[in-house]
Image (cartoon, rainbow, N blue to C red):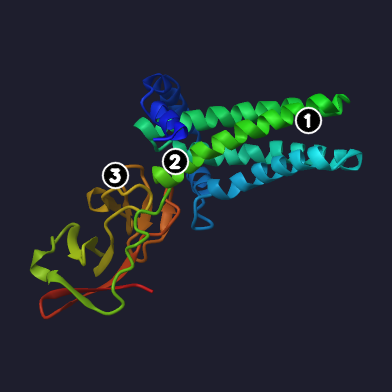
Amino acid sequence: MNLLDDAVSRLERWPALDALADPLRKATQALVKPRVVRNLLSGIPTGHPLHPVLTDLPIGAWSMASLLDTVGGESSEHAADVLVAAGLVVAVPTAASGLNDWSDTFGAVSRVGVAHAALNVTALGFYGASLAARKAGARGAGRGLAYLGLGILLTSGYLGGHLAFSKGVRVNRTAWHEGPGDWQDAGPASDLAPDGPSVVDLDGVPVLVTHDAGRLVALDATCTHAGGPLNEGTFENGCVTCPWHGSTFRLADGGVVHGPASAPEPSYEARVEDGRVQLRARR
């Protein structure tokens, strides 16, 4: 284990961070509770999580500001100042989307997320101080504060990468569930529950099968957001709501109705032939 891995492992096992995480989580969940807010910050309009896209904006602006500070000379001072200010502006929606994603995490992942957020806030403070120093004519101090902010930002970025790629935060849990292109047998129709959901196995993939408005419908039984069991969720108004974090999907086509999920649920065409349930992926 290298030094960075060891440091992150210590963060994951540091229970003192829970004292910060618990009240922050409650406050964040209250703020993102309105459907329009939750859906927007989760990235439903794009079909992908919003936070990873937005992080490119402040990181790009502040990185280029430091580049201009280093090699641009006097003629680039105004452009560097504009980039620092732009980074401060776009950091706000970036932080909001990140808090939205983090609010559904617990334990070790949550603790790393708290450290990630704390570093980002610290970097934000340095860049705010940098802009103030620049406007006051203290350009040397402004550059120095920006360099410190960039170093902290890069450290925070490492933690963000750990959350996404090592811990799988906001990774689509059905990414490899493509489903068959042709009709495939999924078991006897007599095994289906008459008045509720059933789960059938389709080449190792659990598929939720139920009736909706008098017709047979089928979705991947694993929630795309965090892997929750949709078959244990709530069924109403032609939708299923995941019991873990409240993501809601249309039974007809798997479309997302309510976040935090941003990716639609894999959907299947379903029929009964000769007493057997047959499924194929909906294209």
Could you tell me which secondary element the residue under label 2 belongs to? helix
* Quarter residue 184 falls in: bottom left
Residue 254 lies, with reference to residue 56, above or below; the image says below
- What label does residue 243 carry, if any? 3
- Which residue lies at the image location 61% right of the left edge and 41% below the top edge? 93
Quadrant of the image containing the N terminus: top left
Q: Which of label 3 and label 2 is nearer to you?
A: 2
Kind of residue indicated by mark 1: Arg
Q: Is residue 103 left or right of residue 268?
A: right
- Which residue lies at the image location 59% right of the left edge and 37% below the top edge? 154
Along the line of sight, the residue nearer the viewer: 135 or 1: 1
Tag 2 near tag 1, CB within 8 Å: no
Residue 241 lies, with reference to residue 83, above or below; the image says below
First along the sequence among labels 3 and 2: 2
Disc 1: which residue: 143
First along the sequence among labels 2 and 1: 1
Label 1 crowd bin: few (<14), some (14–19), many (20+), radius 10 Å: many
Kind of residue indicated by mark 3: Pro
Could you tell me which secondary element the residue under label 3 belongs to? loop
Residue 20's x, y, as percent? 45, 22
- Please say whether residue 131 is visible from this viewpoint: no
Task: Calculate the distance from the C-alpha at mark 1 to the C-alpha at mark 3.
Answer: 49 Å
Q: Is residue 236 left or right of residue 77?
A: left
* Quarter residue 207 falls in: bottom left
Along the line of sight, the residue nearer the viewer: 109 or 10: 10
Could you tell me which secondary element the residue under label 1 belongs to? helix
Along the line of sight, the residue nearer the viewer: 82 or 73: 73
Tag 3 near tag 2, CB within 8 Å: no
Quadrant of the image containing the C terminus: bottom left
- What label does residue 163 carry, if any? 2
- What label does residue 253 carry, if any? none
